[in-house]
Image (cartoon, helix red, strand yellow):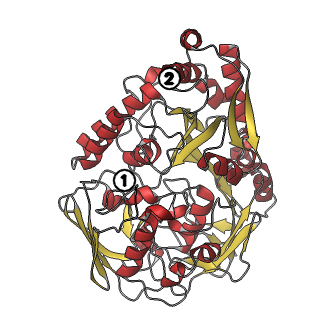
């Protein structure tokens, strides 16, 4: 079906010819945030989930840990609610040419242990994250910097310190959106103490952002984490409250019940059981807006029946067996939109008319035909399952999806629940999961490449299905080297057409951010990536 393109101000690819990100003073208004009146000492409670790993910026690639790191750290730049860029630690970032950037830091900024933030803190942190033997999940964010290697330990020779507050970045190839990436958590600085015992640091991180740990024991595993404001933070995200109490919930239903009972201030994930009623329940405190979130499931090629030509046929058949329109209408009550690509309508360059997108349309007869062709190669045996985390509100749509597959193809199909997100991600990351599994992407920064490179490029850190296609890699490389935004987006669209043939993941739908907030808080705004702007939330009275 035809959809109107939703655009965000300031999210196009950054020009590699004469970009300079201007500096900004401290205070919320500089980041385009709202009013800050209210009790500046009040603690804001919000929902969250137990991080998969210790809180190391370069080893955190999931939303539970990412939400906490973004509160505790400040990067070179940040992203406003609409996805536009503002400077934070950086005073200015200049793109000298398509393969070289110069970064100048603001002086006098510190970590919460008192250490000054200098160029060296960025260089050391990035080298740690990139080093092959450290096996950091986000190491691929450094692959465009000179000296990076997936195969052996090597120094990022492209990072050169000019003085205490200035460093340059030399890229091994043009990367037209590199400056735009620098607000993502993989690029956060680390204090010197982190490298004395990185494991211990991950349990009790010391950041340079708006919030910091309340004290010893602030992170109670599987319960929550307590943050208070950092009095020494001097930047555009200065909090209008006294801290954050992030509660880890076993289910979204429990979180929603707390919101209704006044025990939770802000919720960024309404359970599907409340989709039909939450807007009337909450009134003008309900949130339902587009966000840069893409949902899918992935079937690794290593699984029986899913390698080679047989696997390709079965992926197409499964995709065309899913009635996305019905599921988004019945299960999600209009809070999701059937996918027509692998990105998001809120990102500049999105298209709903890619060649091959018919594989995402519900077509039972074609699905049966493709499944029969696969059976001619090797007869199907066993049960098809989609694994999901039970603490994330996914059972209803997984059940509906496997039922659609079962009814279309006449095979046994079911959901495979895991108690927690961390448990599911552990098996996915260790490559021991033996079923298809729920996947998706909440954008790190507002660009098409971010939905493609990290998930489907050969050896990329979030390439959970170990997909590899030289044609896709080449188109992706051409696109990220192209300094004209329209030309770059055209190449990314061509790359997606390769994905539509191979289906390394099966696109399902785009997510709105559906959330809400309590009666005692104000100035609640959800950003382009579905995360509330916690620093600007105030308590009423």
Dot 1 or dot 2, earlier in sequence: 1
Q: CA distance from mark 1 to mark 2?
A: 38 Å
Return the x and y of residue 49 as percentages of the image width and height: 69, 58
Q: Residue furthest front?
A: 152
Return the x and y of residue 64 as percentages of the image width and height: 63, 59
Can you tell which mark lies on residue 132? none
Q: Residues within 10 Å of mark 2 (few under 14, many from 20)?
A: some
- Asked if residue 109 can be seen in this view, the reply is yes
Residues marked 1 and 2 touching at CB (< 8 Å): no
| Residue shown at the point (53%, 71%) measured from the top left | 35
Q: Which residue is mark 1?
A: 9
The secondary element bearing badge 1 is classed as loop
Of residues 364 and 288, the one nearer the viewer is 364
Q: Residues within 10 Å of mark 1 (few under 14, many from 20)?
A: few
| Residue shown at the point (53%, 79%) measured from the top left | 194
Q: Which residue is mark 2?
A: 312
Disc nearest the viewer among 1 and 2? 2
The C terminus lies in which quarter of the figure?
A: bottom right
| Residue shown at the point (65%, 28%) measured from the top left | 327
Return the x and y of residue 415 as percentages of the image width and height: 73, 33
How many numbered marks appear? 2
């Amino acid at each position: 079906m035809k959809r109107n393109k939703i655009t965000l101000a300031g999210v196009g690819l950054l020009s590699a010819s004469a970009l300079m990100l201007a500096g900004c003073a401290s205070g919320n208004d500089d980041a385009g945030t709202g009013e800050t009146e209210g009790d500046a000492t009040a603690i804001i409670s919000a929902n969250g989930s137990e991080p998969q790993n210790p809180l190391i910026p370069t080893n955190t690639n999931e939303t539970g840990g990412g939400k906490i790191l973004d509160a505790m750290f400040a990067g070179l730049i940040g992203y406003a609610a609409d996805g536009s860029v503002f400077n934070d630690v950086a005073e200015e970032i200049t793109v000298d040419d398509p393969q070289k950037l110069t970064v100048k830091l603001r002086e006098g900024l510190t970590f919460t242990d008192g250490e000054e933030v200098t160029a060296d803190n960025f260089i050391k942190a990035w080298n740690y994250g990139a080093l092959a033997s450290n096996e950091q999940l986000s190491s691929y964010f450094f692959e465009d910097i000179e000296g990076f290697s997936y195969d052996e330990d090597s120094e990022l020779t492209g990072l050169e310190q000019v003085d205490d507050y200035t460093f340059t970045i030399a890229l091994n190839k043009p990367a037209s959106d590199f400056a735009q990436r620098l607000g993502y958590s993989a690029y956060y600085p680390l204090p010197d103490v982190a490298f004395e015992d990185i494991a211990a640091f991950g349990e009790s991180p010391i950041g340079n952002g708006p919030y910091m740990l309340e004290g010893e024991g602030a992170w109670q595993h599987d319960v929550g984490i307590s943050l208070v404001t950092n009095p020494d933070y001097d930047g555009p995200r200065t909090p209008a409250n006294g801290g954050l109490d992030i509660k880890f919930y076993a289910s979204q239903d429990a979180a929603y019940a707390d919101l209704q009972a006044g025990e939770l201030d802000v919720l960024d994930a309404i359970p599907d059981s409340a989709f039909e009623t939450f807007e009337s329940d909450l009134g003008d405190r309900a949130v339902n807006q587009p966000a840069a979130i893409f949902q899918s499931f992935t079937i690794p090629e290593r699984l029986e029946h899913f390698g080679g030509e047989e696997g390709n046929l079965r992926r197409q058949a499964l995709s065309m067996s899913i009635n996305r329109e019905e599921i988004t209408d019945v299960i999600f009550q209009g809070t999701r939109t059937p996918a027509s690509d692998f990105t998001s309508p809120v990102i500049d360059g999105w298209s709903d008319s890619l060649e091959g997108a018919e594989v995402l349309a519900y077509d039972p007869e074609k699905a049966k035909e493709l499944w029969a062709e696969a059976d001619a190669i090797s007869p199907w045996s066993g049960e098809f399952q989609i694994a999901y985390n039970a603490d994330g509100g996914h059972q209803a749509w997984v059940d509906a999806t496997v039922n659609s597959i079962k009814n279309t193809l006449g095979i046994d199909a079911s959901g495979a629940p895991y108690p927690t997100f961390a448990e599911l991600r552990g098996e996915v990351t260790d490559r021991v999961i033996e079923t298809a599994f729920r996947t998706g992407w909440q954008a790190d920064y507002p660009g098409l490449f971010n939905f493609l490179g990290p998930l489907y490029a050969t050896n990329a850190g979030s390439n959970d299905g170990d997909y590899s296609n030289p044609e896709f890699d080449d188109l992706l490389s051409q696109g990220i080297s192209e300094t004209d935004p329209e030309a770059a987006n055209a190449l990314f669209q061509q790359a997606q057409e390769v994905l539509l043939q191979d289906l390394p993941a099966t696109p399902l739908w785009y997510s709105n951010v559906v959330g809400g907030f309590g009666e005692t808080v104000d100035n609640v705004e959800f950003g382009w990536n579905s995360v509330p702007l916690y620093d600007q939330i105030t308590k009423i009275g």
